[in-house]
Amino acid sequence: MQSSAVTGAIPTGRAESTGSAGEEQTKNAAVLSSDFETFLKMLTTQMQNQDPLNPVDSTDYATQLATFSSVEQQVLTNDLLGDLAQAMTGGTLQQLGSWIGRDVLADAAVRFDGAPLVMRPEFEPGADAARLVVRDAAGSVVQRLSLDPSQPVVAWQGVRDSGTPMASGIYSFEVESLSGGTTVARQPAQVYNPVIEVRREGEATLLTLSDGSEIDAKAVTALR
């Protein structure tokens, strides 16, 4: 029985800030509120100190209020349009696009095209041996390989016991943990899977993987 495994550290990525649109919007709202308060004070002072024999026409007050209200609405509209533009071009889409092409660690089948597939198998506590069970797209077992429970990272080479390469296609993996030669647990092996599409559905970010399956981005435990 043939097996091939490698170990190594998985690099971690850092999320970078793309801007401070929220802070700018808050600043604009504060300035607008301050200007509006100032306008009301000026208008009140004007009414209190007008000549009682020659009062300001009520139409003038209405015009001033309408003018300021129009400016207020225009500022708020500009802020809203700016937020929409940020979401459509510079913010949300850019962040979603950053998932494309990344490898995410997930419990899902993965497409094999000849390059080794890297996975992080989980072993049952106390297991003294383990096996990697490989299944094809139809669910048939095509290979069983011995695993060392002390190795946290495994690379499946996609080579048969005879030395010939496996056919390209969709494969899934399961880990059998053994103790004293008896299987004590079976669980799927998490494999690094490339993201080919990303979309938003409500508040969720959904990732389409190489096998066509779709997972919530929150289910991803690591990426590279």
Image (tube, rainbow, N blue to C red):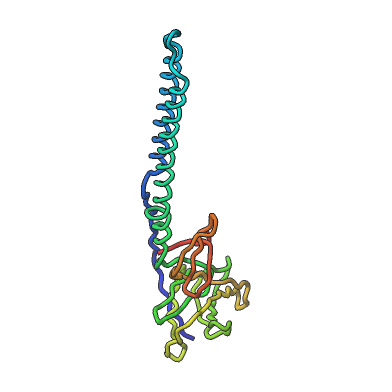
What residue sits 44% from the left and 37% below the top?
73
Instruction: List x then y, in percent, for residue 195.
Output: 44, 68
Instruction: List x then y, in percent, for residue 55.
Output: 44, 13
Could you say which is closer to the camera, residue 149 or residue 79? 79
**Count of labels shown?**
0
Could you say which is closer to the camera, residue 59 or residue 197? 59
Instruction: List x then y, in percent, for residue 189.
Output: 53, 71
Could you say which is closer to the camera, residue 28 or residue 159? 28
Residue 117 seen in this snapshot? yes
What residue sits 51% from the left and 69% below the top?
190
Asked if residue 198 is positioned above or below residue 68 in the image, the reply reads: below
User: Quadrant of residue 43 in the image?
Assistant: top left
Residue 150 seen in this snapshot? no
Q: Along the horizontal axis of the image, is 177 left or right of 22?
A: right
Q: Along the horizontal axis of the image, is 34 left or right of 139?
A: left
Instruction: List x then y, in percent, for residue 97.
Output: 40, 61
Asked if residue 1 is positioned above or below residue 216 in the image, the reply reads: below
What residue sits 44% from the left and 85% below the top?
159
Quadrant of the image containing the C terminus? bottom left
Q: Along the horizontal axis of the image, is 118 left or right of 125?
A: left
User: Quadrant of residue 94 in the image?
Assistant: bottom left
Could you say which is closer to the camera, residue 156 or residue 16? 16
Asked if residue 85 is positioned above or below residue 116 in the image, the reply reads: above
